[in-house]
Image (cartoon, grey):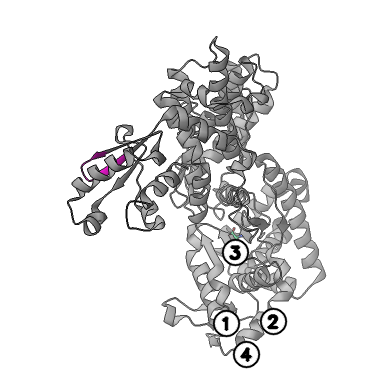
Amino acid sequence: MLKETIVNLLKDVVSPTKEEIEKLLEVPPNPDLGDIAFPCFILAKQFKKNPTVIAAEIAEQLNNNQKSENINVQSQGAYINFFFKNEVWSEKLLNSILKKDFTKMEIGNNERIIIDMSSPNIAKPFGIGHLRSTMIGNALYHIYKTAGYDPVRVNHLGDWGTQFGKQITAYKRWGDPQKMEENAIHECLQLYVKFHEEAENDPELEKEARLWFKKLEDGDEEATELWKFFIELSLKEFKFMYDKLGVEFDYYLGESFYNDKMSPVVLELKEKGLLEESEGAMVVRLDEAEMPPCLILKSDGTTIYPTRDLATAIYRHEEMQGSKILYVVGAEQQLHFKQVFAVLDKMGKAWSSDCEHIPFGLMKYEGKKMSTRRGKVIFLEKVLEEAVTKATEIINEKSPELSNKNEVAEAIGIGSVIFNDLKNNRIQEVDFSLEDALNFEGETGPYVQYTYARTQSLLEKGAWDEAWINELTLTDGKHLNDQASWGLTKELMNFPNVIQHALKKNEPSVLARYVLEIAKKFNRYYNQVRINVEDENEKKTKLILTYATGKILKESIHCLGLKSPSKI
Ligand code: ARG
């Protein structure tokens, strides 16, 4: 709103177009230089004068302009600086922020965005590594939804592939039904690890595993039974985890769903002359894209990961009508996705440019790397449990009188893990430290959750009534005349821009940083200004700002996938 106002003022006196002006406007980091500044360098041609002179002249001209009432225009060097009269503009901005549709935008035209997220592998425990995909995907889902798109969450379960041959082999050789009953998924992991250890000395094992996978692909009854058994017990564990994380999916369409959709793809590749033989296997060459060939069929005729992803992409485009297809998958699969998209392109599918890999960095736990093969996986379940236990201790100490302590500890504990995962650029490695993530004074989930709870308790203390929103009038603005409230109000107003920015880069951290900023600005306000004062009008006005802060905090916290208890 502030920028638009300035664009409209300037467009009457300078020659660049509205769009050009908007691009040039700056938000000075120092409030002494105004709320918005315009650099006059590019006007030198139009006015044939020194930019400093131009800035001074325009500032004066605008100050005498009726349209700029309530805006103080000054110049400094080559810049024009605009100062909005806080008491008038606070009220304008707050009115806009408090509108119901402020946090619901319509820029997405209901376009369908397919989000491939989480996608863990069956018969392995849900490692903390898959957490990143789940939470980044979930945040993107909410961000797209807020912007008015039609996002769809798809869990592309790793429920097919040679690892099932290994899993079946290991289970048949060493599987212990008793242990399976006690803790199936962990037993599966042990078997998987044992397989790799033994296979180092016994090449027969790999052969046997390949045979079992071939049987599975050919529909053998015993292999299929065992495979189904692994899926069932894995899904049970995954769903338990998703429930804890508060994540839902619109579809579970695992790799096996595409089993009958691959031969048409292979045929199409053949017909288009793209399939070539290489050491007994069938590949698509990608020399012109300077990539290694994409493997389509292995020498024993079985399909492979890229083949399934080709069929998957085609399905998502044709059947699911995705106008964009996002793959939230670790950066280590970069080449795989480049190859798959390049093959689609070679097949003449122009929409391959609508497919995008959204990579992210590794997650370490207290400095340790994780690898499933060597059994060094850190179980997400354990991490969440630990976080909740620690959070319970903190809550017991901080607020012993709270009635729903368990619920709050769960929201805080799990929230700390999620926020820690989202707060930095996704491509960065995350080194998870429970102590840091749970620090109520750090850049953490608990810090923003606590700030939200603070807004709610202030409202409660002041006997807040939603009807007051309609009473906000121009004269009340004088109670919002300080720098802290003005800075906060301007930041709240940024919500729609932040959503757009997060979306453009597919980067939830943009929103996470924003929530931290709101929390910091609100706490500054809270520390500098007494909110629940005697004067009824003043109190109401200040609580309106508090309420607006709560609204934006809650919306943003939920977008990131955290809960927002109103009392902590
Ligand atoms: N299951 C795979 C893994 O854990 C991730 C799948 C990602 N999605 C895809 N369409 N390939 O590595």
Spot occupied by residue 317 in the image (x, y as percentages of width and height)? 65, 70
Q: Is residue 350 visible?
A: yes
Q: Is residue 520 visible?
A: no
Query: SS class of the residue under badge 3?
Result: strand
Cβ–Cβ below 8 Å for labels 1 and 2?
A: no
Q: Which residue is mark 1?
A: 347
Tell me the CA gap for discs 2 and 4. 10 Å
Q: Residues within 10 Å of mark 2 (few under 14, many from 20)?
A: few
Q: Residue at position x 24%, y 53% from top?
A: 41
Query: SS class of the residue under badge 2?
Result: helix
Marked residue nearer the N-terminal end (2 or 4):
2
Spot occupied by residue 329 in the image (x, y as percentages of width and height)? 55, 58
Cβ–Cβ below 8 Å for labels 3 and 2?
A: no
Membership of 117 in magenta stretch: no
Ligand 1's quadrant is bottom right
Q: Which mark is in front, 1 or 4?
A: 1
Q: Amino acid at mark 2?
A: Pro
What is the magenta segment's predominant secondary structure? Answer: strand
Quarter of the figure with the C terminus: top right
Q: Determine which quarter of the picture holds residue 120.
A: bottom right
What label does residue 325 carry, if any? 3
Q: Residue at position x 65%, y 27% from top?
A: 408
Q: Is residue 455 left or right of residue 251?
A: left
Marked residue nearer the N-terminal end (3 or 2):
2
Q: Which residue is mark 4?
A: 271
Numbered range of the magenta stretch: 75-81
Q: Nearer the viewer, residue 356 or 323?
A: 323
